[in-house]
Image (cartoon, coloured by chain):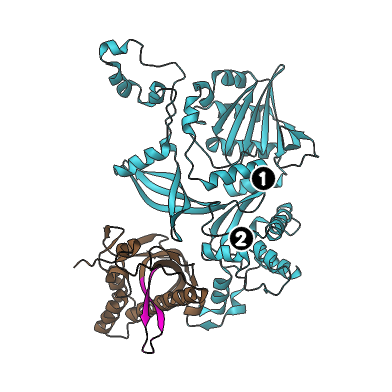
Chain colours: A cyan, B brown
């Protein structure tokens, strides 16, 4: 174990100096060769390292804990401040579980998927979108990557009005003349004219746009792979380009999950899932937009306090709302409360009507708005960028991407010393 | 003239041996080794093409030999029933921080015509190359990806030296053919053709 800690110390910041390896061999120095050998250049190589099939050049396979050390070296060690970092301790627990359960990652697994952050052009304008892909069997030991889901703001068909708009019951008597009015006057409210059973599927729209050459995929700007094979965890790998012995495809984030969440995520990763936007659309309008009752409450709130949460606390701790443990509580200043309210009320804050995220909601913070004896809660997960508003017995779920930054800033102001917030704030910057 | 590649036929197994190959570990290692050797051979040709101390016609001969290593020999080819103009090489520059996509035949032409007075290109040796696992795409057809590093050094007549290091990944199409040797023994022969090259990173040295 001392050996791996020594290596990790090196990777934490001590770059191998050029002078150490200055001897040049055919244009590639010994340093180049060492870094290339240490770098996890291919996803297959990541799997081999994780599985113990191959080793980091500084880890001897004869070591008793070589597999665990190899797994630890597949983490982006820059995410740990020291070996005493609670995140590093969690990573060690993760590695122990992977070793003890003899977890193996295989290309043909259905429990991993790719997230390709693409750049393309839609009707001549540059746009970004995320393509989810999974490995699909073709039979006879053959496989292929297949698109399972698309995430894009331009695929949003959220209505712009909360008013009840419809085709009138006697429109059949006038040859449905009013149909023409929909596209002319209310194209953005088209889903309001659809039957309650209408299920909007953004992936189909994506296919249509590509089919008609309206959307062109230019390149993949960023690529991630998400794995769910380790019991109780979900982790993501990204490519880190740097001249260190800890580079290439590395675990960029990992999250401990409770059993139910893991089961859900596994199910989602296993099947080429369809987005549940249809279901969202089937719900009443109040459930997809920032409801007027919510807006009224926000505007009239007397005070706002917030609680920093550990979403994965065990059951022996003081829990609120299922598994969350309150780590810290603070009352927001008048300015911060005003800023938060303004952010939430800003019309473009929640402009994603139909969104589906392959992510278990693990709240990091809750803002509690009070008005006399009434309470409304805003739960936010920085991991998923999803927020939930709970008011009375109603719960509203929104894509929180647009409000992530202000919420993070307000949270940082309330809990400036919290390391988790500082870390994700650093990432955001 | 357009060259039609048999990859599609291989995928559907209509042109090749219908008996699916299932490799032993040793055979898979052999196939990967062969792929790495072809990539190294291509890298050698690249280095030769860029050398200013070789006559242009010699360098053009290396260009032709290098193109022969690619699907479609660097010209248009057909994959999955779709015609493509040719294999693509991503080219980056540490100073411009951009990635351009060039047809491999044009890339090689540019390489020969570089404005430097002296060019030296070195690449990862076969043993140090990284190869992904073979993925089967047809009865006897496979693909894998090879990652290597290329160090470029260009010197101008004013003795200005530009040096960069690029990490690249190249797709390798492999066909396994069963051949019978003079001794009557059956053996597998691997035919490797190179595909598109992705540029992962470029760092100025």
Mark 2–mark 1 contact, CB under 8 Å?
Answer: no
Q: CA distance from mark 2 to mark 1?
A: 19 Å
Chain letter of disc 1? Answer: A
Indicate the quadrant where residue A361 lies: top right
Pointer 1 local density, CA inside 10 Å: few below 14, some 14–19, many at least 20: some
Q: Secondary structure under badge 1?
A: loop
Q: Which image quadrant for residue A13?
A: bottom right
Q: Which residues are magenta?
A: B171-193
Quick one: A61 or A131, which is closer to the camera?
A: A61
Left or right: where A231 falls relative to B23: right
In this rendering, the answer to whether A407 lies above or below B19 is above
Q: Is residue A161 above or below residue A140?
A: above
Label 2: how many Cα within 10 Å (few below 14, some 14–19, many 20+) = some
Marked residue chain, label 2: A
Residue at image coords 52%, 66%: A41
Marks 2, 1 in one chain: yes
Which residue position is annotated with label 2? A104
Mark 2 or mark 1, earlier in chain: 2
Question: Seen from this angle, which residue lies furthest left?
Answer: B1
User: In the image shown, does B154 or A117 lie closer to the viewer?
Assistant: A117
Q: Position of residue A182 (x, y in %)?
A: 33, 21
Residue B92 at x, y percent in the picture? 40, 64
Image location of residue A314, percent across then percent down: 76, 42
């Amino acid at each position: 174990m001392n050996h791996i800690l020594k290596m990790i110390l090196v990777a934490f910041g001590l770059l191998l100096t050029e002078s150490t390896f200055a001897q040049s061999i055919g244009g590639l120095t010994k340093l180049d060769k060492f870094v290339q050998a240490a770098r996890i250049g291919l996803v297959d190589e990541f799997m081999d390292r994780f599985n113990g099939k191959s080793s980091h050049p500084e880890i001897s396979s004869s070591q008793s804990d070589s597999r665990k050390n190899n797994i630890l070296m597949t983490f982006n060690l820059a995410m740990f401040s020291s070996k005493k970092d609670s995140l590093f301790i969690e990573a060690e627990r993760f590695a122990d579980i992977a070793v003890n359960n003899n977890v193996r990652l295989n290309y043909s697994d259905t429990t991993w998927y790719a997230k390709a952050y693409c750049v393309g052009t839609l009707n001549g304008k540059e746009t970004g979108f995320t393509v989810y892909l999974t490995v699909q069997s073709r039979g006879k030991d053959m496989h292929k990557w297949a698109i399972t889901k698309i995430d894009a703001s331009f695929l949003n068909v959220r209505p712009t009005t909360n008013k009840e708009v419809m085709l009138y019951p006697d429109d059949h008597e006038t040859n449905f003349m009013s149909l023409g009015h929909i596209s002319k006057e209310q194209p953005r409210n088209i889903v309001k004219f659809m039957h309650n059973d209408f299920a909007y599927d953004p992936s189909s729209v994506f296919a249509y746009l590509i089919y008609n050459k309206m959307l062109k995929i230019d390149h993949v700007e960023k690529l991630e792979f998400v794995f769910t094979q380790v019991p109780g965890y979900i982790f993501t790998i990204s490519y880190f380009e740097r001249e260190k012995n800890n580079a290439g495809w590395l675990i960029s984030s990992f999250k401990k999950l409770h059993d139910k969440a893991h089961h859900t995520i596994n199910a989602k990763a296993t099947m080429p899932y369809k987005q549940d936007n249809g279901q969202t659309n089937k719900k009443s309008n109040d459930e997809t937009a920032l409801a007027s009752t919510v807006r009224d409450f926000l505007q009239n709130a007397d005070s706002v306090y917030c609680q920093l949460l550990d979403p994965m606390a065990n059951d022996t701790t003081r829990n609120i709302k299922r598994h969350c443990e309150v780590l810290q509580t603070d009352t927001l200043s008048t300015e911060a409360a005003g800023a938060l309210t303004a952010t939430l009320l800003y019309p473009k804050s929640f402009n994603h009507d139909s969104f589906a995220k392959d992510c278990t909601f693990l709240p990091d913070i809750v803002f509690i708005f009070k008005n006399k004896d009434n309470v409304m809660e805003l739960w936010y997960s920085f991991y998923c960028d999803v927020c939930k508003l709970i008011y009375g017995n109603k719960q509203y779920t929104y894509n929180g991407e647009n409000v992530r930054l202000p919420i993070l800033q307000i949270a940082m102001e309330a809990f400036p010393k919290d390391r988790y917030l500082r870390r994700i704030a650093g990432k955001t910057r | 003239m357009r060259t039609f590649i048999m990859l599609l036929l291989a995928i559907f197994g209509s042109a090749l041996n219908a008996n699916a190959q299932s490799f032993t570990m040793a055979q898979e290692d052999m196939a990967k080794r062969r792929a790495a050797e072809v990539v190294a051979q291509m890298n050698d040709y690249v280095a030769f093409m860029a050398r200013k101390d070789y006559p242009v016609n010699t360098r053009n001969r290396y260009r032709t030999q290098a193109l022969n290593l690619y699907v479609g020999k660097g010209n248009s080819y057909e994959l999955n029933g779709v015609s493509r103009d040719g294999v693509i090489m991503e080219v980056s520059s540490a100073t411009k921080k951009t990635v351009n996509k060039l047809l491999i035949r044009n890339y090689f032409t540019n390489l020969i015509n570089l404005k430097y007075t002296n060019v030296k290109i070195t690449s990862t040796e076969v043993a140090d190359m990284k190869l992904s696992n073979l993925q089967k795409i047809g009865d006897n057809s496979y693909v894998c990806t090879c990652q290597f590093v290329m160090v470029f050094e260009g010197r101008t007549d004013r003795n200005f030296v530009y040096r960069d290091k690029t990490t690249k990944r190249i797709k390798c199409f492999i066909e396994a053919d069963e051949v019978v040797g003079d001794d009557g023994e059956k053996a597998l022969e691997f035919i490797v053709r190179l595909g598109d090259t992705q540029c992962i990173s470029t760092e100025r040295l």
